[in-house]
Image (cartoon, rainbow, N blue to C red):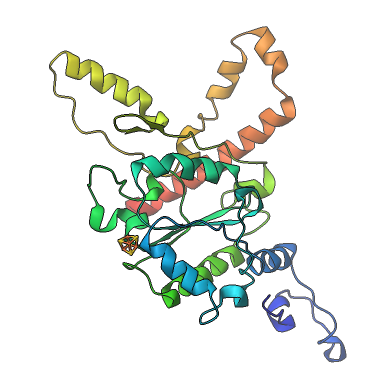
């Protein structure tokens, strides 16, 4: 585990007498909590293709990412904080990957390691490969390369630590799991002749109906962002659903409803901020 530098922690305006500088630290709960989480991150022992060999090399003695508190690679998603997607993501593998992601407890992070996991790599547009895992689950850090070197992976891990350092227990827009309970599970894609994303079921249905009538139906667009932003119903729809029947309304736990509304409001603010930022760019 990395060492705790007391000088880094003392980021408040409260003065500490010189004689107590090395014994007393005044800091925020977010800072100490983030420091402990990012210094003991447990990645899932999971590899997909050639990139996984570089990941294994990074864990071995020459590079040794135990220096980051990450040496405890877990065999179970239920004990892992970090999912490193290391390799080519085939359509067949998306299904177990999403299931594994759903089984990880929050807070959880995803790293797309290499060109394949980030965007399809040399197999982009191949009949059996998806063009990036971020079309199915949210990705926190992308590591470029084919394959990325162990140094590049370590740089990605450090970037993830920096991202965690910047999170706040009070900022629901940033990390919804801190304040308002767990996120919705990502719908597991359906594997048939092709992979079907359940979030696009309605669109696929409409386009199939148009195709059956011989009308042009355009191209199927993938969701703009990762799942939690697309599966959650808008805030104003909730009361309408609840009001549909008296029985349903009674079944809804008011505490859970308030929690969901709060979370959806936070996600709506985040979407608006993202849209504003894209508009400026
Ligand atoms: S990015 Fe390159 S090295 Fe990594 S899995 Fe794809 S083809 Fe293999």
Q: Residue at x 72, y 79 (%)?
A: 4
| Picture layout, residue 182 above or below residue 200 | below
On screen, residue 118 versus residue 166, left or right, reads left
Quadrant of the snapshot with the N terminus: bottom right
| Picture layout, residue 101 above or below residue 243 | below
| Picture layout, residue 149 above or below residue 42 | below
Question: Image quadrant of residue 248?
Answer: top right
Q: Residue at x 57, y 17 (%)?
A: 241
Q: Nearer the viewer, residue 130 or 96?
A: 96
Residue 163's x, y, as percent?
54, 64
Q: Nearer the viewer, residue 174 or 184?
A: 184
Question: Image quadrant of residue 38?
Answer: bottom right
Q: Nearer the viewer, residue 94 or 187?
A: 94
Question: Image quadrant of residue 85?
Answer: bottom left
Residue 272's x, y, as percent?
45, 44
On screen, residue 2 versus residue 155, left or right, reads right
Q: Residue at x 62, y 33 (%)?
A: 261
Instruction: Give the number of marks.
Output: 0
Residue 281's x, y, as percent?
32, 57
């Amino acid at each position: 585990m990395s060492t705790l530098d007391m000088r880094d922690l003392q980021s408040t305006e409260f003065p500490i007498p010189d004689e107590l500088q090395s014994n007393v630290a005044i800091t925020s709960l977010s800072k100490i909590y983030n420091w402990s989480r990012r210094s003991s991150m447990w990645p899932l022992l999971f590899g997909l293709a050639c990139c996984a060999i570089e990941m294994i090399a990074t864990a071995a003695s020459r590079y040794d990412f135990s220096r980051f508190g990450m040496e405890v690679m877990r065999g179970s998603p239920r004990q892992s904080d970090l999912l490193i997607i290391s390799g080519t993501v085939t359509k067949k593998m998306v299904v177990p990957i999403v299931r594994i992601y759903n089984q990880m407890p929050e807070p959880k992070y995803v790293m797309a390691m290499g060109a394949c996991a980030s965007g399809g790599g040399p197999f982009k547009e191949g009949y059996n490969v998806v063009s990036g895992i971020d079309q199915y689950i949210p990705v926190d850090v992308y590591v470029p390369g084919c394959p990325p070197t162990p140094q590049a992976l370590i740089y990605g891990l450090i970037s993830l630590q920096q991202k965690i350092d910047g999170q706040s227990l009070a900022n629901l827009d940033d990390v919804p799991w801190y304040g308002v309970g767990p996120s919705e599970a990502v719908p597991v894609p359906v594997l048939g002749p092709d992979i079907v994303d359940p979030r696009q079921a309605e669109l696929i249905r409409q386009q199939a109906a148009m195709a059956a009538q011989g009308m042009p139906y355009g191209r199927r667009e993938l969701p703009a962002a990762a799942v939690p932003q697309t599966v959650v119903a808008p805030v104003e729809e909730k009361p309408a659903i609840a009001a549909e029947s008296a029985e349903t309304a009674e079944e809804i736990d008011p505490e859970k409803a308030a929690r969901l509304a709060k979370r959806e409001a936070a996600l709506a603010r985040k979407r608006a901020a993202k849209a504003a930022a894209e508009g400026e760019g």
